[in-house]
Amino acid sequence: MNEYMPIVIAIIGWIVLVLIYIFVELKHTRRVRAVVALFRDPKRVWGNPIIAWMVRRIGLTESDLATIDLTPLFRDHRKQVIQAAEAAAREQKWHNFSEHDLVVALYQLESGFHTLCDDAHIEYRDLQLISRWWHLEDEKHKEGFLMRFSREKPLGYSSLSGYTPLLDEFAQPAAAVYDTKRSHFHLSAHKQMLKQLQGILTQSGFNNALVVGESGTGKRALIFALTRLIERGIASRGLNVRRVMVLNMERLLAGITNQGQLRDRVGAVFAEAERAGNIALVIENMHEFVQVKNGLSTMSIAEIIIPFIRSQRLQLIALTTPEGLQDVIARDKQLHDSFVVLQIAEPTPEETMVILFDIIDDIERRSEDMVYFSYQSVRALVTLADQYISQGKRPQKVITLIDQLVSWLQTKPVRDGETNIITKSHIEQFLSERFGVAIGEGDKAVRDTLLNLEKLMKEDVVGQGVAITAIANALRRRQAALSSHAHTIGNFLFIGPTGVGKTSVAKALAKHYYKRDGAFIYMNMTEYGGPGAVQQLIGTRDEPSGALSNAVRENPFCLLLLDEIEKSSKEVRDLFLQILDEGRLINPRQDIVDFRHTIIIATSNAGAELIHDTVQGGDQREQFDSAAIKQRIMEHIVHEHLFSPEFLNRFDEVVLFQPLEKTQLHMIARMHLDAAATRILDEHDATVEFADDVIDAVVERGYTPEYGARELQRVIQDMVESVLAKMVLEDKLRKGSHLIMTRAMLAA
């Protein structure tokens, strides 16, 4: 009896497929008739369930659609509408046109509906994707119908499977491991990969698959999709009786201390799977288990499993990353040659949207209609994830964003019975709170900051208006999308003598642009002038930690100040050529560090003497920002080989800082002293005023042509703050007291 069981199973499978085909054909015919019926009563169009579903995803309301009269179009141009709907269905490779194809046709032929779509930022391709979204949901319902019959294996299936108690101890069915409650997860986006995987598993000779892809690109989802086809009985020949089992390598290797134990346990599990004859084993992160480290020794698992996986009775599906393939598996030729490599690329933004359609349907259903995603919000999720989340790959980073967004929305108050309709604004608000920065082209706070940036920064900085204006203009261009997103927010090279305010300008910008503490990152580039400096900044393959990559990865919304860049090595400056040009860094492990939300300011004293000499010529100070003077100083810098032309050209603006005037030095000293007075007031509730001769004394002592105003802060600490501290300790400066400090009271 048992020998006839596979034939019986095959016959039952074919009967089910024929019945399904007849059911689908009838359903398609009904939908064509439903479209034709709408021509007889155009007022029913917007109430049709499928069309209503689509226009709601766009965000259109009944009042929006009430102004559109379809009667003339359906009466006078019926043939053109049907042809347009048929063409839309053909473009999607569907068997027949349906109501959702009629919506696409209306966009082309009905000007009122076209205008509504334009206002909602919906184009022809968007409607095709929305149509596909509905189609996927419809397919999912049909799959649910089918799965009710295929969840339980046919009678006699167990007789085709060997007895595997040891394997069952260390492995689980893939369907159980990967079922995330998102039943249709990724299947549509991985159709071609799924076809290739089945081809590998059914070919003659070595038919083991090595699935290679970055984390988050869908390797596990591909295996889950394969198990769904097997459950439905519609996988490629020979696969429908396969048991796809995920091997728990941590459990398998637990407690093993030597190569003998490793050989006995792993060999026994693989031998049992081989005897069963219908097992496909899955090993995740294969590269981590080729060589098993135990203390100071290393044990090899590859030589144990190779004889089994070269057998025709056992198949292995191994998952790894591009680095794992290159660094580990490819180095063992015998192991590598036992596999056929299947590369999984990161899905495109459009492919990612299709994946999200599947997931969102389940999220909405589980929320009991408390959450609803418009099409525009799905599009924005992919766009904004790419723009603001550099860690991870599509689709996983977008899926994670959705989960976080829904959790965040659940903390927001909603009136009873209302649905949270998720929009692009919700996503921008969530990301703003997550990263602590203002996100969104319509954000009034961002616009106000940029329009008033010069005024805001000049409250904290004395002089150097040219630098402030150059930065403000660059940031306004970025916000208005006149600059490419594949770039930092702005790259600036500040050139000028020591102590003229280069760092102060950078700090003021970080304060007012990012509006949060911790947005200013300082790097002293004199520390990166020797051998190995690049490795210090970005790490190595074995040690991925680097000072630069770590700082920006942990804090991508920042202002990065590269102080005294000319003292770094040439290799370091070459590294920044890529960063300044592309807005990203690829480290030795091929990880991307995103600088697109970073402002980079490099400072240098190069050409400082020429700058100082230039401003000594009478009225030339007023003409300091002229193109002729700037060109002269730039030519000097290139001629002296201080910076290469290629390096200088990577900056949006090279800003020259001129020496400070005496009146500006007095203003800076006054700002520092006022800050000291504020601290006295806050900490001791006492007020302090400073006479003008105190300002004079501080400037006389604190200013030098060599160091500019850099020493002012230290001089104030020595001459002023030390005196005030002593008065506090002697109880001469107590709560409620008022002191006017004069030059005679200063420390010597």
Image (cartoon, rainbow, N blue to C red):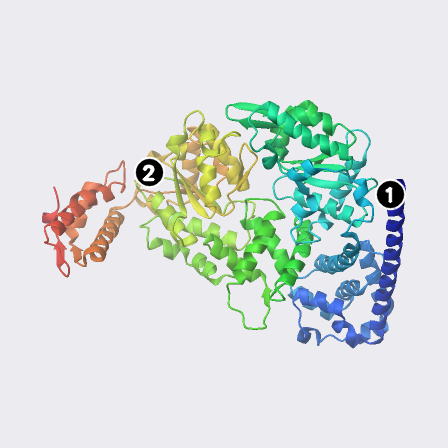
Disc assigned to residue 6: 1
Residue at mark 1 to residue at mark 2: CA–CA distance: 86 Å
Q: Helix, strand, or loop for circle 1?
A: helix
Foreground residue among 18 and 76: 18
* Quarter assignment of residue 97: bottom right
Task: Determine contact: label 1, label 2, CB under 8 Å.
Answer: no
Percent across and percent down for residue 132 are: 74, 57
Percent across and percent down for residue 548 are: 45, 37
Q: Residue sitting at 48 percent across and 54 percent down?
A: 434
Badge 2: few (under 14), some or many (20 or more) residues near its Cα, within 10 Å? many
The reply to whether residue 648 is in sight is yes
Counting residues from the start of the chain, the first of labels 1 and 2 encountered is 1
Against 86, residue 324 (above or below) is above
Left or right of 384 on screen, residue 617: left
Where's the C terminus, which quadrant?
top left
Percent across and percent down for residue 96 are: 85, 59
Foreground residue among 103 and 613: 103
Left or right of 140 on screen, residue 455: left
Q: Residue sitting at 89 percent across and 58 percent down?
A: 22
Where's the N terminus, which quadrant?
top right
Against 232, residue 364 (above or below) is below
The reply to whether residue 644 is in sight is no
Q: Which residue is mark 2?
A: 497
Foreground residue among 226 and 454: 226
Percent across and percent down for residue 245 are: 70, 40
* Quarter assignment of residue 61: bottom right
Left or right of 565 on screen, residue 301: right
Q: Hey, what amino acid is under mark 2?
A: Pro
Q: Hey, what amino acid is under mark 1?
A: Pro
